Image (cartoon, rainbow, N blue to C red):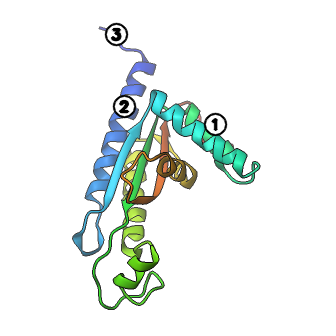
């Protein structure tokens, strides 16, 4: 059987998206608590994400990255989404989130700084996998914001990033 480069590249990008999810899962986490959720979108789900990004762009009167980034989502093979569950560690003294302790943070509805830090480490681990496999990618808060707004994650995931992935002769994320 003969496989074309296009077929093999598409299969490779899908495999790398899965490896990115694995890297996010195994990334180090504060106090060893795993509050990371990952998804991979393609097809109609990916199209729905870019449509939501365009709606947000319209709400912002075109100010911001949403419209531009939606075009990158459209041109990508897949989008890896990584979000952090907003949990609390139950610490009596911390204050890194801007509140005296976890109880005060929860009462204010704030995000736990450990979860947000863990999200950054998970995203870094995921994009390093893509880079190691020479798969073009771009970290986009805009795609994560739209995904959370669409309810793609469980309700307690309020902060997420999207990472579109693509294999082409020239990175589609370079000249934006």
Secondary structure beneath disc 1? helix
Q: Is residue 91 visible?
A: yes
Q: Quadrant of residue 114?
A: bottom left
Badge 3: how crowded within 10 Å, few (<14), some, or many (20+)?
Answer: few
- Left or right, 150 with respect to 94, comes to right
Residue farthest along the top direction in this orientation: 1
Q: Give the mark nearer the N terminus: 2 vs 3.
A: 3
Q: Return the disc, 2 or 1, that comes first in the chain's sequence.
A: 2
Quadrant for the C terminus, please: top right
Question: For numbered disc 3, what is the local secondary structure?
Answer: loop
Q: Position of residue 33 (x, y in %)?
A: 24, 68
* Badge nearest the viewer, 3 or 1: 1
Label 2, label 1: how far apart the Cα atoms are: 22 Å
Residue 107, position as x, y percentages in the image = 41, 79
Between disc 2 and disc 3, the foreground one is 2
Disc 2 + disc 1, Cβ < 8 Å: no
Residue 55 placement (x, y as % from top left): 65, 42
21 relative to 5 in the view: left or right: left
Q: Residues within 10 Å of mark 2 (few under 14, many from 20)?
A: some
Q: Which of labels 2 and 1 is toward the front?
A: 1
The residue that mark 2 highlights is 12
Q: Quick one: label 3 or label 1, which is nearer the N terminus?
A: 3
Near-viewer residue (159 or 169): 159
Q: In this rendering, would 32 be left or right of 55?
A: left
Q: Which residue is mark 3?
A: 2
For marks 2 and 3, give the CA distance.
16 Å
Residue 172 in view (yes/no)? no
What's the mark number on residue 71? 1
Total marks shown come to 3
């Amino acid at each position: 059987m003969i496989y074309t480069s296009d077929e093999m590249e598409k299969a490779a990008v899908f495999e790398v998206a899965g490896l990115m999810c694995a890297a996010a899962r195994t990334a180090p986490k504060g106090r060893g608590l795993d509050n990371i959720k990952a998804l991979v979108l393609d097809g109609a789900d990916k199209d729905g994400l870019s449509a939501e990004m365009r709606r947000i762009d319209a709400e912002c009167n075109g100010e911001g990255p949403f419209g531009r980034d939606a075009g990158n989502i459209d041109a990508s093979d897949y989008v890896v989404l990584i979000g952090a569950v907003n949990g609390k560690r139950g610490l009596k003294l911390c204050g890194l989130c801007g509140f005296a302790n976890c109880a005060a943070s929860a009462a204010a509805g704030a995000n736990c700084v450990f979860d947000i830090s863990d999200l950054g480490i998970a995203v870094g681990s995921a994009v390093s996998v893509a880079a190691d496999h020479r798969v073009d990618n771009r970290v986009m808060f805009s795609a994560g914001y739209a995904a959370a707004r669409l309810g793609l994650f469980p309700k307690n995931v309020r902060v997420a990033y999207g990472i579109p992935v693509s294999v082409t002769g020239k990175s589609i994320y370079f000249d934006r």
